[in-house]
Image (tube, coloured by chain):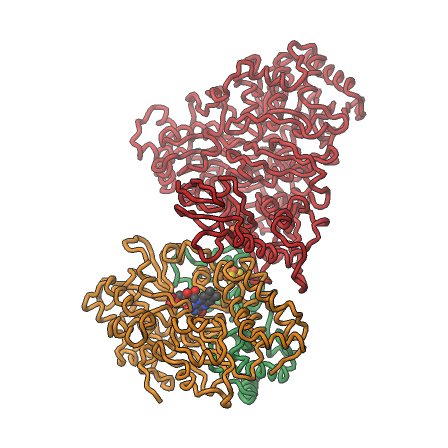
Chain colours: A red, B orange, C green
């Protein structure tokens, strides 16, 4: 700490901090534009000029380090003249038409001009006009307003990891743009809208739809990924108009992914289900809640009587709230069925009975920033976890070594220390190699259990040795399993191996949670086998079994309750899932959307999305975040917790008399239990077989595209126009293309199981041999089957 | 005519096409200073001491003491360090570095090698002004010659000292003469100056400790090592050691480069340059390149050509570019052209310079075109005041100072333009 | 995209800088590309970006920052006349006016036969030789009186 004087006040501030930071900590505001706490210092706007004793000229507070004994005047005549002078310069070429500017009311320039601007303009010359740019569907430009602070450029270079915007030209001709004709495709692009202190970069979907003072701002939590980003949701006349980040250093910092920011458009979709509907004699009719719920209760009762309670299954989206999931499992178990699951995209459940606790991140999210080595296994990291990727990027800048084991060599826009790119079926073997290397480096005791895991390993490859030593030599280190690993057909082995590597290397170990509430779903027992706080221990079928994946006839369900689930998009094997659901006797769907549900359900119950209900998400680090609804439910929509409660009442089940979600919450946490006690990634040991598995056949790598992951985002129109939402293609290496005698751009027929689709072939050298990357969760590919497995590709 | 001692252009014969070559350079004591250092095992500290003693001041514009600058380079630093020669010479009126490189390239190379030795540096870059392609090619050839002869590369002349030198070609941006813009430019970016601190001595090229000197500064080193710092100092005046090349342009009979000792009267320099063209009267002179304040002829005729004397006269010696204007010159037009230059060359990074230079230019342009207003002169002065000292780099000052000096010294002429909507000359 | 000869030249420039600093060669790479192609089309900049492992926009920033890059096609000969103050004091403007008259074009225009483009330049560091002009960024012509300009144009037209 050093002692300085600001405006006559003695204060002590951290050594080496800037005048601006020091002043800020002591409640002294210094005007600024280019400075941003998360970006490098540019010192280009010059708005923060202050007087420093003994300095011959005013100094930029944002860039000048404090020195012991420094006397700073932020309000002296010298400082004021300098600041006013800069404000005048900023305004001479800036349009003064705030009333028609989208930033009006939340513009830093407008705000500061009031305090630091002159009343009349001495500038009598022509104003500069700058051409607008098309940056894509999310960001709209009004470039004449730009004040050249370069925050947007620095954001790309430093935070998003890719420079998509630059400042071309020089002097007065300097302008912010993307490379000729290119759009901004970063999954974090929307943050530049917040960063832009003026109205030069504004939200395209929001543009001209409301003035800021008409909006009420309400707190919420993002439902889209495991991070649980904190949101401000802005509402006008009961409609969500815009979503902004709410600062939380421990989670999303001041950022939002584009998915979190723009998915709200899906809330206002035409496809919203606003009235209960039932299928009567093959015809869909709208009805009231009483009728619909009776219909549902009768259907379920009928199925129970005809088959048994165990023939009924419930599939719930992991994006549902904890309260909804809790009540749903309670209802199921009260009916007498343990068939409940939220893991629709998981395919390998062998480890289910070996779980020691709830799979979670294994550390706090914020801890990622201080890691020195990381191994990410099976993850489309940037797209599945945009802000975790961002944290890793910043950590890598500070010297963290990023190691990757993945089937796809996607550009992570950061330094990758070591990477092993293997076809999906080689993933477990690669991990076994890393494990063996770690054992050898550490000289660890080879227990029978470890020996079993590494017995098939042959000669170690140097990359895998390097990964093992990276984890061992750099503390703290961590291992994370991504979505792809969790969906993988050999997930259990991957889980076991990764855990063993963590144990040997001393790394922490965890999962990058796929959905908003995986941890919450486990906690409240929305799984057939594992339960922490569920009411009964009754176990049952997992998602794959319910959907008939095992082909053992009687294992699948005859009746379903779906909660926020679109099986064709949300299941591991869409082909199989649809077939089973369609052939089921009775299907109740609770959903915010109509979608294709009329094709395969019998009753549709409109339930509220996260903005229209109160609820709780537990994010991937195990943080409990409750939120309130920000708007009243649309049409006849009801919160799902209420719907389940009434349905349970109709089914005459005991213990469903909650009047508020708070009561549900109180029931879940009845002993004030600390959920930390339930978080545990360990497995009881079990037999696995790791083989050198040479699949000669062509294998699919199917992953969920970023904007297809949940029902809301699938309906967000602007996101659907982005590059990331482009229609799936059959991606493969040039070698495979050649072998199949296909040219990139050709139409091909892709066959998997009973399904065939036509796609365009495309070349991607970042893929391993014999692998074709074909996205799932898209209308064009739902006819295919499992996300992984054998497929055939033929030229048309 | 008087004979002046030469440290830079000694033995240079621009009419002889081979005079620049290594062999010719060696014949005029070339590389003797380097050989002396290596054979006598003179230590880096001793060299820096010698340079300090010589009172050699940077020839690039700011006149910063070179020995002192060299002593800022961190010692015992493991990792790369760099020296960079600033041959970007874009300051209007200046063309001395071109001639040093074109006609005496090995002098610069030797100077840089010695500097590298003194600062423990293994690699250097010479950033050459974009428009002088032939000179760049010659420098490339000269560097090849020096490398082939063992003056550059590993284990120079059999010693344990290694140094490599590379030429980097500019492509037309005045701002790259500013030392941190120049570093950015070498790094393959736009030439936008960096905010200082950190200074290049700590965070320079590729983030490594770096010393930047002007071409002429480096080229002054071999002589002063051969003859000693004291001898160099004695060529000039205390605090203003040695000789310097002045580039004389404008209304003189023989524009060109003239090397004279520091402290030589301006009148002598004018005489060397053949006197005023057509015997006309000296109206004004910019003594240090276009960024420096103009001085009226009578003040100039009394001044001596060294840093301190010119500062006392109210301007700056800058890069030593002497722009001579006779009494036919319209000062409004002169200023308009300069204001346009700074407007065009502003890098656009910081607000006062980006916005202010255009404003200044437009007002002067208006006055020149008979559309001036009575309040314009005070407005110009105030805008210049709002730019000066508020920018990231000194280009802002360079744009502001000429405006203020022109209005200060030739206010009547500007007023006449505004009132009569035409020129008085 | 670029000839092997140009690529060799670029490789020589890359070798001047530390291995991890390839980007340092972007200015010369663009200059070399421009010499081969006459101007810098988007594809050319894209290619240079790829070759040096840079983002295209970063290359574009450089190409638009420095004066001597041609972002649009120019004539076979680009003539740049210095009109900065020192030159203006010694005939720079007159030389520019004479060129305009002889070529029948203004600044930033190209003759209809595609032979000449005329540009106004800033200080070329040759103020003592005024009037000066630069042909295709590389050849500096000094003391350009009207007669010398005539001679030069004739020589270039051949
Ligand atoms: C706008 C601007 C342009 C400059 N141009 C040059 C130049 O062309 N050549 C030069 O040597 N120094 C130039 N300088 C000065 C350099 O920044 C730096 O001070 C100098 O190269 C240091 O070398 P010296 O100490 O040997 O003078 C310029 C400075 C500014 C602000
Ligand atoms: S003063 Fe001008 S040239 Fe210097 S950094 Fe600022 S904008 Fe760029
Ligand atoms: S905030 Fe300091 S210069 Fe912009």
Give A630 or A555, whichever is nearer the viewer.
A630
Tell me where residue B29 appears, x and y as whole percent: 26, 78
Tell me where residue A30 appears, x and y as whole percent: 54, 46
Quarter occupied by the N terminus of chain A = top left
Give A574 or C95, whichever is nearer the viewer.
C95
Give A366 or C88, whichever is nearer the viewer.
C88
Q: Residue furthest left?
A: B40
Give A136 or A751, whichever is nearer the viewer.
A136
Q: How many marks?
A: 0
| Up/down of B372 relative to A606, above or below | below
Residue at 52 percent across and 57 percent down: it is C58
Residue at 54 percent across and 33 percent down: it is A227
| Up/down of A785 relative to B412, above or below | above
The image quarter containing residue A346 is top right
Do we see residue A756 in this rendering? Answer: no
| Up/down of B313 relative to C17, above or below | below
Tell me where residue B339 appears, x and y as whole percent: 56, 70
The image quarter containing residue A257 is top right
Tell me where residue A414 appears, x and y as whole percent: 47, 46
Q: Please indicate whether residue A653 sits to the left or right of residue A162 in the image.
A: right
Do we see residue A527 in this rendering? Answer: yes
Q: Please indicate whether residue A190 sits to the left or right of residue B183 in the image.
A: right
């Amino acid at each position: 700490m050093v002692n300085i004087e600001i405006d006559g006040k003695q204060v002590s501030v951290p050594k080496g901090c800037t005048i601006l930071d020091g002043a800020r900590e002591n409640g002294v505001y210094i005007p600024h534009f280019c400075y941003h706490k998360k970006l490098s210092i540019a010192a280009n706007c010059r708005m923060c000029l202050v007087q420093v004793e003994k300095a011959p000229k005013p100094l930029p507070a944002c860039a000048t380090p404090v020195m012991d004994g420094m006397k700073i005047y932020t309000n002296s005549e010298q400082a004021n003249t300098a600041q006013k002078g800069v404000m005048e310069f900023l305004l001479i070429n800036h349009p003064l038409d705030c009333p028609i500017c989208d930033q009006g009311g939340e513009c830093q320039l407008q705000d500061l001009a009031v305090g630091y601007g002159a009343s009349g303009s001495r500038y009598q010359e022509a104003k500069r006009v700058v051409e607008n740019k098309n940056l894509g569907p999310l960001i709209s430009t009004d470039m004449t307003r730009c004040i050249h602070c370069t925050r947007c450029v620095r954001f790309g270079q430093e935070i998003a990891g890719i420079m998509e915007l630059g400042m071309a030209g020089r002097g007065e001709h300097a302008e912010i743009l993307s490379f000729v004709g290119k759009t901004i495709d970063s999954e974090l692009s929307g943050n530049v809208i917040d960063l832009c202190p003026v109205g030069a970069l504004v939200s395209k979907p929001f543009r001209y739809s409301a003035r800021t003072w008409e909006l009420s701002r309400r707190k919420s939590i993002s439902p889209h990924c495991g991070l649980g980003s904190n949101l401000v949701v802005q509402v006008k006349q009961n409609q969500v108009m815009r979503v902004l980040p709410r600062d939380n250093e421990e989670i999303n910092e001041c950022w939002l992914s584009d998915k979190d920011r723009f998915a709200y458009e899906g809330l206002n979709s035409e496809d919203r289900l606003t009235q209960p509907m039932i299928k009567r004699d093959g015809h869909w009719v709208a009805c009231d809640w009483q009728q619909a719920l009776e219909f549902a209760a009768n259907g379920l009762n009928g199925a129970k009587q005809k088959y048994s309670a165990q023939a009924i299954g419930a599939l719930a989206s992991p994006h549902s709230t904890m309260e909804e999931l809790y009540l749903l499992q309670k209802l199921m178990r009260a009916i007498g069925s343990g068939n409940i699951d939220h893991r629709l995209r998981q395919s390998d459940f062998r480890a289910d009975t070996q779980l020691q606790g709830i799979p979670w991140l294994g550390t706090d999210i914020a801890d990622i920033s201080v890691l020195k080595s990381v191994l990410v296994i099976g993850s489309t990291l940037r797209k599945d976890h945009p802000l975790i990727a961002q944290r890793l990027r910043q950590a890598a800048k500070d010297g963290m070594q990023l190691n990757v084991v993945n089937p796809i060599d996607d550009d992570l826009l950061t330094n990758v220390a070591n990477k092993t790119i293997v076809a999906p079926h080689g993933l477990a073997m690669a991990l076994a190699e890393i494990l063996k290397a770690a054992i050898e480096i550490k000289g660890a005791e080879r227990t029978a259990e470890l020996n079993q895991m590494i017995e098939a390993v042959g000669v170690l490859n140097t990359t895998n040795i390097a990964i093992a030593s990276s984890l061992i030599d750099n503390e703290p280190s961590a291992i994370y399993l991504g979505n792809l690993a969790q969906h993988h057909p050999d997930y259990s082995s991957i889980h076991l191996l990764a855990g063993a590597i963590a144990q040997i290397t001393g790394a922490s170990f965890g999962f990058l949670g796929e959905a908003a509430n995986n941890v919450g779903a486990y906690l409240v027992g929305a799984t057939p086998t594992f339960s922490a706080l569920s009411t009964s221990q009754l176990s049952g079928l997992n998602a794959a079994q319910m959907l008939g994946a095992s082909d053992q006839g009687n294992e699948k369900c005859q009746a379903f309750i779906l909660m926020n689930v679109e099986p064709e998009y949300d299941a591991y094997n869409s082909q199989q899932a649809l077939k089973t659901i369609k052939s089921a006797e009775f299907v109740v769907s609770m959903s915010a959307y109509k979608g294709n549900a009329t094709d395969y359900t019998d009753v549709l119950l409109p339930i509220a999305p996260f903005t229209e209900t109160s609820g709780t998400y537990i994010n991937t680090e195990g943080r409990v975040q409750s939120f309130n609804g920000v708007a009243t439910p649309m049409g006849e929509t009801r919160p799902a917790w209420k719907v389940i409660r009434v349905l349970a009442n109709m089914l005459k089940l005991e213990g469903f008399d909650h009047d508020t979600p708070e009561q549900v919450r109180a029931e879940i946490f009845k002993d004030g239990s600390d959920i930390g006690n339930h978080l545990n990634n360990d497995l009881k040991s079990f037999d696995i077989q790791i083989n050198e598995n040479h699949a000669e056949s062509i294998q699919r790598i199917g992953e969920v595209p970023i904007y297809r992951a949940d029902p809301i985002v699938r309906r967000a129109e602007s996101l659907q126009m982005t590059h990331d939402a482009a229609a799936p293609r059959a991606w493969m290496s040039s070698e495979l293309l050649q072998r199949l005698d296909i040219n990139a751009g050709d139409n091909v027929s892709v066959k998997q199981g009973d399904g065939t689709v036509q796609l365009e072939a495309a070349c991607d050298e970042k893929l391993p041999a014999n692998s074709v990357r074909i996205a799932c969760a898209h209308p064009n590919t739902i006819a295919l089957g499992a996300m992984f497995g054998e497929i055939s590709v033929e030229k048309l | 005519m008087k004979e002046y001692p030469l440290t830079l252009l000694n033995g240079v014969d621009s009419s002889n096409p081979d005079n620049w070559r290594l062999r010719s350079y060696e014949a005029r004591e070339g590389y003797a200073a380097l050989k002396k250092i290596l054979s006598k095992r003179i230590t880096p500290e001793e060299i820096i001491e010698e340079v300090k003693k010589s009172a050699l001041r940077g020839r690039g514009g700011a006149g910063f003491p070179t020995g002192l600058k060299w002593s800022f380079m961190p010692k015992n630093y493991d990792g790369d360090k760099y020296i960079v020669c600033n041959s970007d010479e874009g300051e209007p009126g200046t063309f001395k570095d071109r001639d040093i490189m074109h006609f005496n390239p090995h002098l610069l190379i030797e100077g840089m090698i010695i500097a590298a030795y003194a600062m423990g540096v293994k690699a250097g870059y010479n950033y050459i002004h974009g428009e002088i392609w032939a000179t760049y090619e010659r420098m490339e050839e000269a560097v090849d010659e020096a490398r082939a002869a063992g003056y550059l590369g590993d284990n120079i002349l059999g010693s344990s000292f290694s140094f490599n030198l590379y030429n980097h070609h500019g492509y037309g941006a005045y701002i790259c003469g500013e030392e941190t813009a120049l570093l950015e430019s070498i790094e393959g970016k736009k030439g936008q100056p960096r905010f200082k601190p950190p200074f290049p001595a700590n965070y320079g090229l590729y983030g490594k400790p770096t010393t930047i000197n002007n071409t002429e500064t480096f080229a002054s080193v071999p002589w002063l090592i051969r003859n000693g710092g004291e001898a160099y100092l004695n060529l000039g005046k205390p605090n203003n050691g040695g000789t310097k090349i002045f580039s004389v342009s404008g209304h003189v009979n023989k524009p060109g480069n003239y090397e004279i000792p520091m402290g030589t009267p301006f009148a002598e320099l004018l005489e060397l340059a053949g006197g005023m063209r057509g015997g006309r009267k000296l109206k004004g002179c910019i003594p240090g390149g276009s960024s420096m304040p103009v001085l009226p002829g009578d003040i100039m005729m009394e001044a001596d050509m060294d840093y301190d004397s010119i500062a006392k006269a109210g301007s700056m010696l800058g890069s030593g570019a002497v722009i001579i204007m006779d009494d036919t010159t319209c000062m409004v037009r002169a200023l308009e052209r300069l204001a346009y230059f700074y407007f065009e060359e502003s890098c656009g990074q910081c607000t006062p310079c980006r916005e202010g230079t255009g404003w200044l230019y437009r007002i002067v342009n208006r006055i020149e075109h008979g559309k001036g207003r009575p309040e314009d002169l005070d407005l110009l002065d105030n805008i210049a005041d709002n730019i000066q000292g508020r920018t990231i780099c000194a280009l802002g000052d360079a744009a502001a100072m000429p405006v203020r000096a022109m209005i200060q010294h030739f206010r009547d002429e500007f007023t006449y333009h505004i009132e009569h909507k035409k020129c008085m000359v | 995209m670029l000839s092997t000869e140009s690529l060799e030249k670029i490789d020589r420039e890359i070798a001047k800088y530390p291995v991890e600093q390839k980007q340092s060669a972007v200015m010369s790479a663009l200059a070399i590309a421009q010499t081969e192609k006459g101007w810098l089309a988007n594809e050319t900049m894209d290619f240079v970006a790829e070759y040096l492992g840079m983002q295209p926009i970063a290359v574009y920033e450089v190409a638009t920052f420095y004066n001597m890059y041609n972002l649009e096609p120019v004539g076979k000969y680009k003539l740049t006349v210095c009109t900065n103050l020192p030159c203006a004091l010694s005939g720079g403007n007159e030389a520019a006016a004479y060129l305009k008259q002889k070529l029948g074009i203004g600044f930033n225009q190209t003759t209809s036969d595609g032979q000449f483009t005329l540009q106004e330049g800033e200080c070329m560091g040759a103020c003592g030789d005024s009037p000066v002009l630069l042909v295709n960024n590389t050849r500096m012509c000094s003391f350009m009186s009207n007669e010398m300009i005539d001679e030069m144009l004739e020589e270039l037209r051949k």
